[in-house]
Image (cartoon, grey):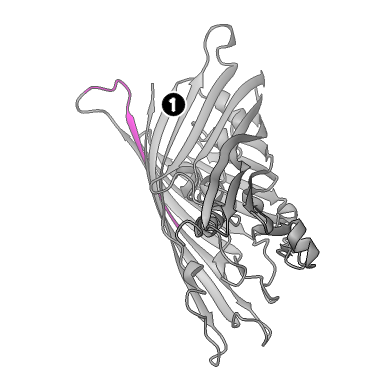
Amino acid sequence: MARAADARLLAALLLALASSPSRANTFEIFGFGPRGESMASALTAEADDYTAVFYNPAMLVLRKDLNFGFSFSWHHLAAEVVETDRSKQFADHTCDYCHPADAVGYTTGLLFPLAGKVKNRLALGFGAHVPSGRFLRALASDPNRPAWYLFNSSPERFVLYAGAGLRLAENLTAGVGVHALADLVGQGAKVEVDLFSKRVKLREIDAHLSNRAGPLAGLFWAPIPSLRFGATFRWELALYYRIPATVDLEGIGTLELTVDGVTHFSPHTLAAGMAWDVTPDLTFSLDGQWMNWAAAPSPYLNLTIDLSGNTLQAIGLDKALDITSPTTPPGFSNTLGGRLGMEYRIGERFAARGGVFYRPTPVPRQDAPETNVLDASAVGLTAGMGFSFDDPLEVFAHPVKIDLAGQHTFLLPREAKKEPTDPVPPYRYSARVYGLTAAIRYDF
């Protein structure tokens, strides 16, 4: 009996490897680096270090010194999901994903200006984020379980950006880059089972991760030193997974099972912004961001089961037992959000920062059956500071820079009105996101 259970265990393994989509990444949700986070990520025309590889790669070439940084970040979602019909309640485990785990991770980056004949004309940069717990988490939530679209597993994935900035003219630069992910694909799993002797004759699986990268590009223009404009376009990116399995039941037929779908979807994104030095010590930055969420795939995995064979065909069950999970477009809408940041520099050693942003939700009301995607329009307040000091041990020749940032985001209340026949009761939900980020930077 234990051997005969291998086929069931394999099917469970395949479902565990597959995932429902988690979306965007930690840079897109929270920001890259404490300076960016404390200024509400309004840095399309104001990124001044290695974080430009994400915000606008055209700005990498503006810096003349090699720049390195390392940061730690923590973000917590405090959610409230409450039934609105007192006669109904969530069933056991229905709301397990209503309260995501904290997003904790480490980020590093490097900006490297080239020398020689391309000095002050070409610079390279990269940025990476590594979650503290899992390198890549994929969460498979059932359509009848409410789950937060941006927060349940999106922050728990490795993030990598690389780019180059090129100076086209004295006040005009351009940049290109890539952001990378991977696909989980499989040649398939094969199992042969002799039901009469209850013996597994063959059991194997072949799956791998393959590279996937999306391009990004940016422009930067400073008509005068105190007024700067920038624009960035990031191509959509997603992790595609597909794992087929074949179970040969000798004397009965063949079971073919396939799980597939899309996870970690980031839409086409266009950001445009400006930065204005009101005084030599005070800078305001303003960004607008359009995201093509209408192209988002279904947020649930696809499952196909096909039974075939001469014995099943003879008794007319070869088609009757075939199963395909329903696939319904999520009906997301494109969004247009805004961000405003500020930095006030007190001398060369201290800067105070703040910002506010509005991020509209692409997710429609979740009133229909088997649609329980939790997301809401967000209003965020950010603040932070940066300071530098000389190394008392004199190991470093230049000042060491420390940046701190805090974020408080309000996910505005929404309500899901469910039909009486829906197994999920009607509910309302909202949340607050708290975050802290600290970094050390150094210019060589």
- Is 80 located above or below residue 291 in the figure? below
The correct choice, above or below, for 343 with respect to 164 in the image is below
Q: Secondary structure at mark 1?
A: strand
Q: Which of 335 and 426 lies nearest the eye of the viewer?
A: 426
Magenta highlight range = 394-407
Q: Quadrant of residue 402?
A: top left
Q: Is residue 151 visible?
A: no
Left of 363 or right of it: where is 146?
left
Q: Position of residue 408 (x, y in %)?
A: 46, 60
In the foreground, 141 or 224: 141
**Residue at horizontal 64 percent and vertical 62 percent from the top:** 361
Type of the residue with mark 1: Asn
Residue depicted at 68% across the width and 77% down the height: 367
Measuring from the top left, give residue 67's x and y in whole percent.
Answer: 44, 26
Residue 243 lies within the magenta run: no
Give the image location of residue 45, x and y in percent. 60, 37
Residue 385 found in image quarter: top left
Name the spot of residue 383 as percent of width and height, x first.
44, 52
- Residue 215, picture quadrant: top right
Q: Is residue 428 visible?
A: yes
Residue found at the very far left of the displayed protein: 393
Q: Which residue is mark 1?
A: 67
Direction bottom: furthest residue: 87
Q: Is residue 366 above or below residue 338?
A: below
Q: Nearer the viewer, residue 136 or 382?
A: 136
Residue at left offset 48%, top offset 48%: 37
Question: Quick one: which residue is furthest to the top in this view?
Answer: 117
Q: Residue 396 in magenta?
A: yes
Specify few, some or many for label 1: CA neighbours under 10 Å numbering under 14, 14-19, or 20 or more: some
Quarter of the figure with the C terminus = top left
